[in-house]
Image (cartoon, grey):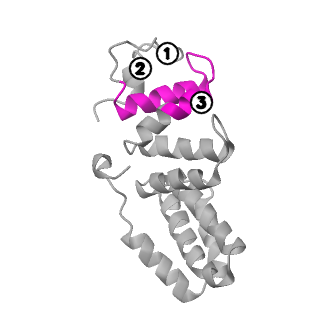
Amino acid sequence: MEKSWLGKIFSPAQKTQPAAVPPNLDRSDAEVQFGLGLQCASGTGAALDYAQAADWYRKAADQNHPLAQFNLGTMYAQGQGMAKDDAQSLVWFGRAANLGDAGGQYNMGRSCQRASMDGRPADAPEARIEAYKWFQLAAAQGYKNADGAYATLTFKMTRADVAEAVQRVASFSAAKDRKRLPA
């Protein structure tokens, strides 16, 4: 990508106040859409507007922008700008995680860990294996608390489960080409 959304919306001299969004800005560009969503969600340059932020994030997320997907998942989880929807939150965290976003991976790990405790006992080992995988992938990127989460999880896992989880981590490959992924 040529420039981040900051370079497209902010002039280099401006670090604290955003420039008005130029009318010729390519609003179909995922980076620009993400930046506009971030502005609306933070109230930077305009009034705080979670509903508008969600609209911009969805446009970027539909183009497989991992941070927009993560932010959209967070907004669904917290009910910001939309009704709280844990199922939709998980969908967007999963998409971000599969693109290699550490926050999405950590949240997928938390979801799987909860499922291992709340679901049927027969399904618990599989949920723990998936939780371990996601926590380990997030930890490899330095995501806060992820390393402790997968380490603690191993106390409830068999050696075979840990070996399977390690294999899944090794075989995971984040999709690098966002344009070719289905939305």
**Residue topped by disc 3:** 51
Residue 176 vs 172, above or below: the answer is above
- Give the x, y percent position of residue 22: 38, 12
Give the residue drawn at x 42%, y 30%: 33
Front-most of residues 168 and 59:
59
Asked if marks 1 and 2 touch (Cβ < 8 Å), the reply is yes
Helix, strand or loop for disc 2: helix
- Give the x, y percent position of residue 9: 41, 20
Cα–Cα gap, marks 1 and 2: 7 Å
Q: Main secondary structure of the magenta part?
A: helix
Residue 19 vs 176, above or below: the answer is above
- Give the x, y percent position of residue 59: 43, 36
**Residue topped by disc 2:** 9
Front-most of residues 149 and 86:
86
Q: Which quarter of the rendered picture does the N terminus lie within?
A: top left
| Dot label at residue 171 | none
First in residue order: circle 3 vs circle 1: 1
| Dot label at residue 18 | 1
Helix, strand or loop for disc 1: loop
Give the residue drawn at x 42%, y 55%: 100
Residue type, numbered disc 1: Pro
Residue 25 vs 129, above or below: the answer is above
First in residue order: circle 1 vs circle 2: 2
Mark 1 closeness class: few <14, some 14–19, many ≥20 residues within 10 Å: some
Residue type, numbered disc 3: Ala
Q: Quadrant of residue 114?
A: bottom right
